[in-house]
Amino acid sequence: MRPMIPTRTLPADAASIQEAATILAAGGLVAFPTETVYGVGADALNPDAVARIFTAKGRPAEDPLIVHLAQLSDLPRVTKGYPAVVDHLAAHCWPGPLTLVLPRGPAVPYGVTAGRETVAVRIPAHPVARALIAAAGTPVAAPSANRFGHTSPTSAAHVLADLHGRIAMVLDGGPATLGVESTVLDLSGPIPTLLRPGGVSLETLRDLLGEVAVGGRAAPTGGQVAPGLLDRHYAPDNALHLCIGPDTACQAWLQQAARTQMAAGRRVGLLIPDEDVALFADLAVDIEPLGPASDPLAIAARLYAALRALDARQPDLILARDVGEAGIARAIRDRLTRAAATVHDGSEGVVF
Ligand code: AMP
Ligand code: MG
């Protein structure tokens, strides 16, 4: 059996940050707050330390890590030249929730990039993250601090729920403010390509760059089962069913689905904007209100805590709807789609 590592949780003050930096420099793992979600970090230039991240998370080696820097002048330590547009993007978006995929520098182990000749890099805005990386004196590879396939952590308690006994320390810096992971933009090809929507919106990137292609995975609709490659946050017995469509169509679909499932004796959990809550007043459903539909930033901040809270109460299934795709809502849609077993557009009957 794998030996337990005693995990210490410390308030993110100057003394703990210094201690955490010492652990990183010695090849250990530390979880820390960023403005997106909590990350679990290791010295990005130490292949053994990087390997420990994959073991602690149970993350497949094919999934590359993001390298976090304290300042722009560190970029040449991890890249092999980069396009001039990086300076323009950095001036507007760094420090902040934007990750850039750039040519890999020779110092970056292939364990970080999953064998690729590109490396994903970001400068986080959270003062604790930046102080920690600066004190460690090395670039820090850090994925989200959760077990692979689980919901990303937005608090120190979430980190402990997943990684207690697997990492040396958690720096508790309070709840993550943004609540969803960074935007990933690939600059290694001829056209900048959005690989993952996040805290910096597609609209902002297009304002800054002109043409930006949308890559990665399109959201399936029409009741398709999401491909098995996607992150899944739920076991099949409490699967999430998502409606992406006009508000009124999705509200009607959710009501019909909730009634049908309850009539079949199943316990239903709902992940819905505040406005929808009254629609279910006469039903014994378990509701996690996400926040006002008009405030997707508030919904992003609550999304993962709401998913975890609902999942912990183990409904037989979860029904959810999203709030469009403008700005950060695109990231909310992406994460809900990844969590979903089935995705619907509200136009068909309930088919699961
Ligand atoms: P996480 O650290 O869990 O937020 O996930 C990092 C994600 O960034 C990966 O799952 C990839 O989608 C993306 N990523 C990291 N490195 C690269 C790379 N070299 N090329 C393309 N995508 C990358
Ligand atoms: Mg992750």
Image: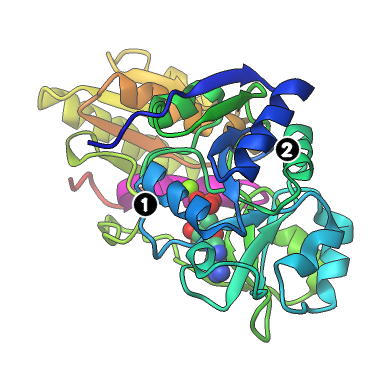
- Left or right of residue 207, residue 319 in this image: left
* Rendered view: 333 above or below 23: below
- Name the residue that disc number 2 marks: 132
Instruction: Point out the stretch of residues depicted in magenta.
Output: 326-345
In the image, 294 versus 103, the foreground residue is 103
Q: How many marks?
A: 2
Q: How is the structure coloured here?
A: rainbow
Mark 1: few/some/many CA within 10 Å (<14, 14-19, 20+): some
Q: Residue at x 26, y 59 (%)?
A: 228
Work out how far the residue at label 2 is from the one at label 1, CA to CA, in angstroms: 29 Å
- Identify which amino acid the numbered label 2 is placed on: Leu
Location of residue 142 in the rendering, given as x and y in whole percent from the top left corner: 57, 48
- Name the residue that disc number 1 marks: 231
Residue 344 drawn in magenta: yes
In which quarter of the view is residue 90 placed?
A: bottom right
In which quarter of the view is residue 185 placed?
A: bottom right
Q: Secondary structure at mark 2?
A: helix
Q: Residue at x 17, y 35 (%)?
A: 237
Q: Secondary structure at mark 1?
A: loop
Location of residue 178 in the rendering, given as x and y in whole percent from the top left corner: 66, 36
Mark 2: few/some/many CA within 10 Å (<14, 14-19, 20+): many
Respond yes or no on whether mark 1 lies under 8 Å from ligand 2.
yes
